[in-house]
Image: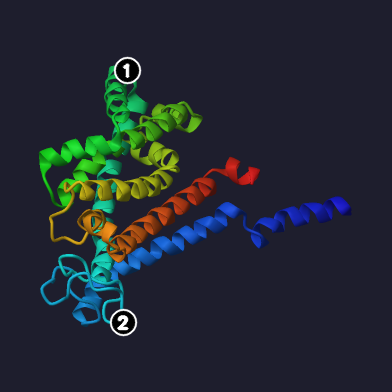
Amino acid sequence: MTSLRNNFLRLIRPATRPNLSMQLMTVGAVITGFFLLVALLAPLLQSWGWIQSPTESLINPIHAEPSARYWFGTSRQGYDVFSRTLFGSQAAWQVVILATALSLLVGVPLGLVSGYLGGRLDRVLLFLMDTIYTLPGLLLSITLAFVVGRGVINAAIALSIAYVPQYYRVVRNHTTSVKNELFIEAAQAMGASTWTVLTRYLLLNVIQSVPVLFTLNAADAILTLGGLGFLGLGLPEQTPEWGNDLRQALEALPTGIWWTTLFPGMAMTLMVVGLSLLGEGLNEFVNPKLRDKA
């Protein structure tokens, strides 16, 4: 009777008391959802007249302190820091989603083909991806930003190339282990083409970790985009972007103008933390071994 009661408690405990990782994932999802909502609503709030245009500067005083009129103060150029902080989330989402999507669309198919076919193609792709992976992501993005120039699409391309090897390695390693399973051999014996095996039987079995990697890469991409903007290599000058705003505010910081750096930096930090917590929670959610240990 006692054993039966203990088994029952063990079954209901995960439902009544979620572990710490699941709680942190919930916090990360709330933070991420908040910034996504801000990015979607910022243009609407501007059209209603609730916030200023992030590119208008002549109508505001320079370095005005936070107040009821200017919630986050104004910058050296007279920009409203509150509106630029809100619109900065929009620029971050645009670049990050595009960059991670491009790296996913390139890395996943290459990993599938390389892991399934093997041979010389696998060795060449593995050598190429290892070469790219050994380069620091920020340094590679800076080099590519010099070549392709500024802009949302150009920044996304510069960021995506650094993440392609990660998707490739994850998918390739899963593919090499799954392709020897009985259901794959059965499909091959029934005459299924390579395309059918890859898309119908392998794809859904090797992408369990891709959403986790997608989320963690998004957090890293925000920091890299901020680094590019801080160096003046990210988005165009007037585009509200947190890294660029921090670069423009750096000179005024020693004089006591703290608000032009605090709020963009805080927004970037919170968004990175939210995506990181979400990714770590998803990692435990899709990995039963980690969930059982917790």
Local crowd at mark 1 within 10 Å, few (<14), some, or many (≥20)?
few
In the rendering, which numbered label is found on residue 119?
Answer: 1
Toward which corner of the image does residue 238 lie, by quadrant? bottom left
Q: Secondary structure at mark 2?
A: loop
Quarter holding the N terminus is bottom right
Picture coordinates of residue 262, whole percent (x, y): 34, 61
Q: Is residue 149 above or below residue 11?
A: above
Mark 1–mark 2 distance (CA, rounded to whole Å): 66 Å
In the rendering, which numbered label is found on residue 68?
Answer: 2
Q: Residue furthest top?
A: 120
Q: Secondary structure at mark 1?
A: helix
Q: Along the line of sight, which residue is nearer the eye, 152 or 164? A: 152
* Residue at 36% across, 27% down: 116
Q: Along the line of sight, which residue is nearer the eye, 144 or 83? A: 83
Q: Along the line of sight, which residue is nearer the eye, 210 or 139? A: 139
* Residue at 44% across, 32% down: 174
Toward which corner of the image does residue 288 lie, by quadrant? top right
Amino acid type, mark 2: Ala
Q: Is residue 253 above or below residue 141?
A: below
Amino acid type, mark 1: Gly
Q: Along the line of sight, which residue is nearer the eye, 163 or 248? A: 248
Picture coordinates of residue 253, whole percent (x, y): 28, 58
Residue 243 appears in the picture as rendered: yes
Residue 193 appears in the picture as rendered: no
* Residue at 56% across, 55% down: 22
Mark 1 or 2, nearer chain start: 2
